[in-house]
Image: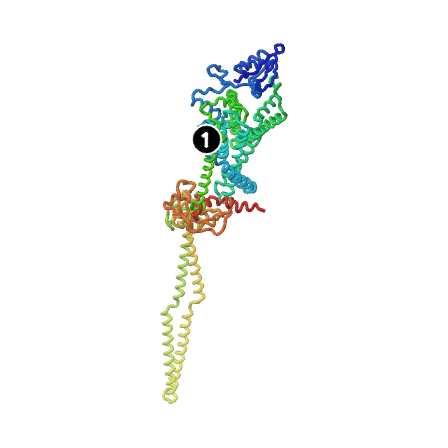
């Protein structure tokens, strides 16, 4: 422990027991009471605090505690009356060893025991890496500041002006990031970069950084941590710079994330979603970091500017003294402002509110998902956190270290901490000299110029620009096999997944009704056709020929009889034949004429025996029956489920559908021809002019990130589609699927379409140029 300086002038009043101490260096005089004087006499030698507490309580019947004696020592230290003394392990008692860090005798063992703390895992010593980064970044600090600062300002302005769009993307980000994912994402971005920033600045001022590790906040939340141990007191400027570097890093991240989000948003990149999530996380982080009620960078920056590094500790001491009182040795020399009390009360209320909110939120979440078990888990978590805080407090008491939530806390005080006094010698590095020679200035200028020239030169390298976008795979042909008739599935010949030719029978529906309809209709058609044939063949040709022959015979006989009658009448006129003979001839002629008329009537009757309208009716019936037969045959054919195209049955377990009943139009199976795959690429609107038909396409699937596929652009959809992240143009490509197995319908990934060759600087700054030409242009009145 510390003891009084040897050069102090110490005088005691024998009557009252009071004493006076004069500091020969500052010529200040300090007056103390009887009990204080007794304590000062004990502090003249290095004695264990437990012995001092026991002695003063026994002598004055007091109730001093080790914490109160430690507060009195802190007052003496603030007045500059103490001198630190390193503990000697050879002469330390077990009680003394409990209040000091272990001595560093062995180099490795000393380092390990020094950097290991409760709830912290040491990983490696980052000091060589930090020194190298410091050397590389130091010449570029002014250039980086001039470049990054405007970018940050534009990025923050972009977030403010596009807040409505950002809210939509945050809703998408919330569905992508879980609580665990957010913790990991925050650790590798905000936490890691801010820790590196602190450590690099710390190395700039010669602060030891012996350990890079992981600390567990409240024993649960992992965070990267670089342990910073000051070996000398830091000047005010250094403390301000060290306190502000974390805020600057967060603001840089916020502005950069805003620009990246706006530039990549129209392309639908996952980077845009990650940037939106980073903006949200940085905003929450800034709320807690800038909050002076928490011991973060905001509080440290304020106290560094106000040159009051112990303001928080003094505020709690004031509140503790006000509520619980303190010995006169403490109260006589302690002066607190009202601001100390207000700040301490505000901190207590804020911490209580945050604790209650977090506890209620976690409890509600656990109870809604696990019911009573969730409540038990919450109680276990609360108990674990309390035990962790008590263990940490016990460790800090034993190590004589103040509680701190960051390794930079001790750096922001005026004096070197006890931990710094115990740093192993091999971990101490002298501070970097701020005064540089002309050689160093010239070297830094040359390095800066080389970097700038290299960056400018790289901008002119030819670069094959590629247009990227998310894609979805579809088969070149895909059809649904649906039931074309109602019926029960009687037979299923394939189970699914087979490659079959077009027209192959897959399943058979029940066809009893369709078979009956075909048979009945076919029989009716045959009957009608026979009836038509009968009508068309009645009377026969022979009958008509016979009737015509009989008519001709009758006509010939009538002509002969008529001629005979005329001849006999001539002879009768000459008196050669008798009257009786002529009368007989006339009778025969009349009978033959009547026979001709009868035969003509018979022939006419025979020819008009079938009605033409009856034939037309039979013909109409035949046409109707033929149409019905065609319909029933088609219905019978529809009971067969066949492959509509050559391809693969993608519906599995088809045989389980046997004996199921299908309604007409109900889906039975899906079939696709995936010998070639159709690619639908969502190209951002701003890159649509660089896409051409026939361009080569390179693709990577999310399911097969190590394999590259190659295709070709076949068509471009003539309209622009609206997506949640912006306007896109759909580009149709074609990709061979030789084994018919690697590429499957519905797979997604990212595709790059070959574009024109352009300088590297133009290719990688197109987004920034578009931001300046459109976004910033839109800001102008």
Residue at image mark 1: 131
Residue 382 shown left or right of residue 529 in the figure: right
Comparing 622 with 86, the one in front is: 86
Residue at the farthest front position: 438
Front in this rendered view, residue 366 or 151: 151
**Mark count:** 1
Q: Secondary structure at mark 1?
A: helix
Q: Residue 704: where, in percent of width, then height?
A: 41, 40
Q: Is disc 1 surrounded by few (<14), some (14 to 19) or many (20+) residues within 10 Å? A: some
- Residue 289 placement (x, y as % from top left): 55, 32
Is residue 706 visible to the viewer in this orientation of the structure?
Answer: yes
Residue 356 visible, this angle: no
Tell me: 318 left or right of 410. Answer: right
Q: Residue furthest top?
A: 15
Q: Nearer the viewer, residue 68 or 304?
A: 304
Colour scheme of this structure image?
A: rainbow
- Along the horizontal axis of the image, is 103 left or right of 19? left
Q: Is residue 689 above or below residue 295?
A: below
| Above or below for 326 versus 684 | above
Residue nearest the viewer, comparing 693 with 306: 306
Q: Say which residue appears at 40% left-offset and 50% top-offset.
A: 645
Q: Position of residue 58 (x, y in %)?
A: 57, 11
- x, y percentage for residue 432? 48, 29
Residue located farthest toward the bottom when viewing the structure as drawn: 574
Q: Quadrant of residue 17?
A: top right
Quadrant hosting residue 542: bottom left
């Amino acid at each position: 422990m510390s003891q009084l300086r040897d050069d102090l002038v110490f005088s005691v009043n024998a009557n009252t027991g009071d004493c006076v101490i004069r500091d020969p260096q500052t010529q200040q005089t300090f007056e103390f009471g009887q009990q204080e004087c007794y304590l000062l006499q004990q502090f003249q030698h290095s004695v264990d605090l437990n012995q001092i507490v026991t002695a003063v309580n026994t002598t004055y019947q007091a109730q001093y505690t080790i914490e109160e004696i430690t507060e009195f020592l802190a007052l003496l230290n603030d007045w500059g009356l103490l001198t630190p003394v390193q503990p000697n392990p050879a002469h330390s008692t077990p009680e003394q060893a409990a209040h000091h860090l272990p001595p560093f005798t062995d180099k490795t063992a000393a380092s390990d025991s020094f950097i290991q703390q409760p709830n912290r895992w040491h990983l490696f010593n980052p000091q060589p890496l930090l020194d190298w980064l410091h050397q590389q970044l130091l010449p570029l600090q002014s250039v980086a500041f001039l470049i990054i600062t405007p970018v940050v300002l534009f990025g923050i302005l972009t977030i403010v002006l596009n807040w409505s769009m950002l809210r939509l993307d945050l809703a998408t980000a919330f569905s992508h990031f879980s609580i665990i994912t957010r913790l990991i994402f925050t650790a590798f971005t905000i936490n890691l970069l801010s820790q590196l920033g602190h450590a690099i600045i710390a190395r700039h001022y010669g602060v030891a950084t012996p350990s890079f590790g992981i600390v567990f906040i409240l024993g649960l939340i992992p965070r990267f941590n670089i342990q910073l141990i000051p070996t000398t007191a830091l000047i005010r400027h250094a403390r301000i710079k060290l306190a502000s570097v974390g805020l600057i890093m967060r603001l840089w991240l916020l502005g950069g994330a805003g620009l990246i989000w706006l530039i990549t948003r129209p392309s639908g990149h996952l980077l845009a979603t990650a940037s939106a999530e980073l903006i949200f996380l940085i905003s929450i982080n800034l709320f807690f970091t800038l909050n002076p009620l928490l011991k973060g960078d905001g509080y440290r920056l304020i106290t560094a500017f106000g040159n009051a590094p112990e303001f928080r500790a003094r505020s709690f001491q004031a509140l503790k003294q006000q509520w619980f009182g303190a010995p006169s040795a403490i109260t006589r020399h302690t002066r607190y402002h009202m601001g100390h009390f207000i700040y301490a009360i505000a901190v207590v209320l804020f911490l209580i509110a945050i604790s209650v909110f977090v506890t209620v939120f976690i409890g509600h979440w656990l109870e809604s998902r696990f019911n009573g078990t969730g409540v038990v888990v919450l109680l276990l978590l609360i108990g674990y956190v309390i035990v962790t805080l008590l263990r940490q407090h016990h460790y800090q008491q034993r190590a004589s270290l103040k509680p701190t939530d960051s390794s930079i806390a001790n750096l922001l005080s005026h004096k070197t901490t006890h931990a710094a006094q115990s740093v192993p010698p091999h971990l101490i590095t002298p501070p970097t000299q701020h005064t540089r020679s002309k050689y160093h200035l010239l070297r830094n200028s040359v390095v800066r110029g080389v970097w700038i020239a290299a960056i400018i030169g790289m901008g002119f390298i030819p670069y094959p620009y590629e247009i990227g976008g998310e894609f979805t795979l579809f088969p070149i042909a895909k059809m649904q096999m649906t039931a074309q008739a109602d019926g029960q599935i009687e037979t299923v010949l394939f189970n699914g997944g087979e490659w079959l030719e077009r027209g192959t029978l897959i399943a058979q529906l029940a066809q009893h009704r369709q078979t009956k309809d075909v048979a009945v209709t076919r029989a009716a058609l045959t009957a009608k056709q026979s009836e038509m044939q009968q009508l068309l063949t009645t009377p026969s040709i022979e009958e008509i020929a016979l009737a015509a022959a009989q008519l001709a015979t009758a006509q010939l006989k009538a002509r002969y009889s008529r001629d005979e009658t005329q001849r006999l009448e001539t002879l009768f006129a000459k008196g050669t034949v008798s009257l009786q003979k002529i009368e007989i001839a006339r009778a025969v002629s009349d009978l033959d004429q009547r026979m001709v008329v009868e035969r003509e009537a018979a022939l006419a009757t025979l020819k008009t025996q079938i009605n033409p309208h009856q034939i037309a009716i039979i013909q109409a019936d035949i046409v109707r029956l033929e149409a019905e037969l065609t319909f029933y045959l088609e219905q019978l054919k529809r009971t067969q489920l066949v492959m509509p195209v050559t391809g693969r049955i993608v519906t599995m377990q088809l045989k389980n559908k046997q004996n199921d009943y299908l309604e007409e139009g109900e889906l039975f199976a899906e079939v696709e021809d995936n010998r070639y795959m159709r690619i639908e690429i969502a190209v951002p609107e701003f890159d649509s002019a660089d896409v051409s038909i026939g361009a080569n396409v390179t693709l990577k699937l999310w399911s097969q990130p190590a394999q590259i596929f190659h295709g070709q652009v076949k068509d471009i959809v003539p309209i622009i589609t609206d997506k949640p992240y912006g306007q896109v143009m759909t580009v149709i490509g074609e990709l061979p699927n030789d084994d018919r197995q690697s590429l499957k319908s519905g797979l997604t990934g990212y595709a790059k379409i070959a574009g024109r060759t352009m300088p590297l600087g133009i290719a990688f700054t197109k987004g920034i140029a578009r931001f300046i030409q459109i976004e910033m242009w839109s800001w102008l009145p």
